[in-house]
Image (cartoon, grey):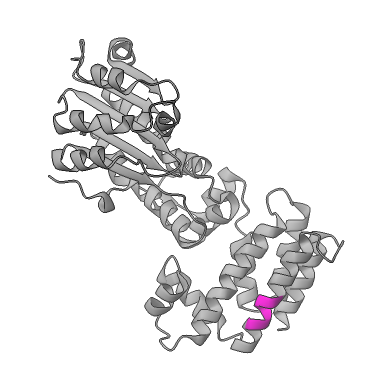
Amino acid sequence: MAVKRETVTFTSLSKEIKGGTFRNIYVLQGEEPYFIDRLQQMIIDTALTEDQRDFNLSLYYGNTANVREVISACQQYPAFSQYKVVVVREAQLIAKQPGHKNDLDLFASYAEKPLPSTILVICHKGGALKSKPFTDALKAAKSGVVFSSNKVREGRDLESMIVSYANSLGCSIDSKATSMLADHIGTDISRQFSELDKLAILTQDNNITPLLIERNVGISKDYNNFELEDALARRDAAKAFRIVDYFERNPKNNPSLRVIAMLFTFFAGTLIASTSRDKSPEAVMSLAGASSTYRARKFLDATRMYNTRSLVNIISYLRECDTRIKGIGSRQNEYALLKELVYKVLHA
């Protein structure tokens, strides 16, 4: 079956590998190193036992690898194993070797007729692998796969990734729990997945909840960015200031600039909802880049408390607070500035 690059995801590929189904050639490329590292290690761990690796695992590094030697290793049959695994790490460095600029093209001839018992894994970090002869041959052979590991952006992409990975572990995760992890950990993918792995083991009903996260990750389910967002959306002044007081007592887990970034995303989405002609959750979700219709409904609910003029002013207050917290035009304590911001938002 022909491989369609656009349908290949980390979740689908890892499920395939864990199930013992392998492609002859994997090109793992892109700017997010975590997915590349995890997939290549997953292939090694699944295809070979520890005893088999001495004879059937060949590791090469781009700064010293000779492509002809790599291909020669690929053409050798496994010893006492179903597979031989050949891994080229940091393949982007091959082109930087003197006189080796186009050596990746040499893989094209191997891709045309790969040895069925060999699994070749090429890890190319920092961008796409630049070898049209190789990638064309790989597509024609229909026995290889190209996975692009893109940087995960905060917001919709990050929250979607958290939900997708939790689902791949056989767990459900609600919107509040997803936002708690996204706000607290951010785009540190290694830590996100590590925490989700832990939570999947600890849950008794395959449901990752805010309470489970509070008990095991160290994020308060009542005092977090998600709850501050809700309090401001309802103009609940008492709760909003309680949360900021908690942030000030726990600055390590609640950096002020991350709070500003979260509030900016929320009120920017609310402004979009306020000015949208189509007020359906689906339309607002698309326009605002929301992670779900649930999130879009929160934007729409907030428009009942804040008119368009107020929202424009709030965006201005957020920009001003961000600048002052960074030390431009102010020497006030960052949480004092955050409290001032909350006051302005509530009275916008």
Which residue range is magenta in the image?
Answer: 312-316
Q: Position of residue 263 (x, y in %)?
A: 62, 68
Q: Position of residue 64 (x, y in %)?
A: 43, 20
* Looking at the image, residue 44 lies above or below residue 205: above
The secondary structure making up most of the magenta span is: helix
Q: Is residue 262 toward the left or the right of residue 1 in the image?
A: right
Residue sitting farthest toward the front: 99
| The image quarter in which residue 69 lies | top left
Q: Is residue 129 toward the left or the right of residue 210 in the image?
A: left
| The image quarter in which residue 291 lies | bottom left
Q: Position of residue 195 (x, y in %)?
A: 51, 42
Which residue occupies 37% across, 44% down? 128
Quadrant for the C terminus in the image: bottom right
Which residue occupies 49% across, 44% down? 189
Q: Is residue 83 toward the left or the right of residue 247 in the image?
A: left
Nearer to us in this view, 64 or 36? 64
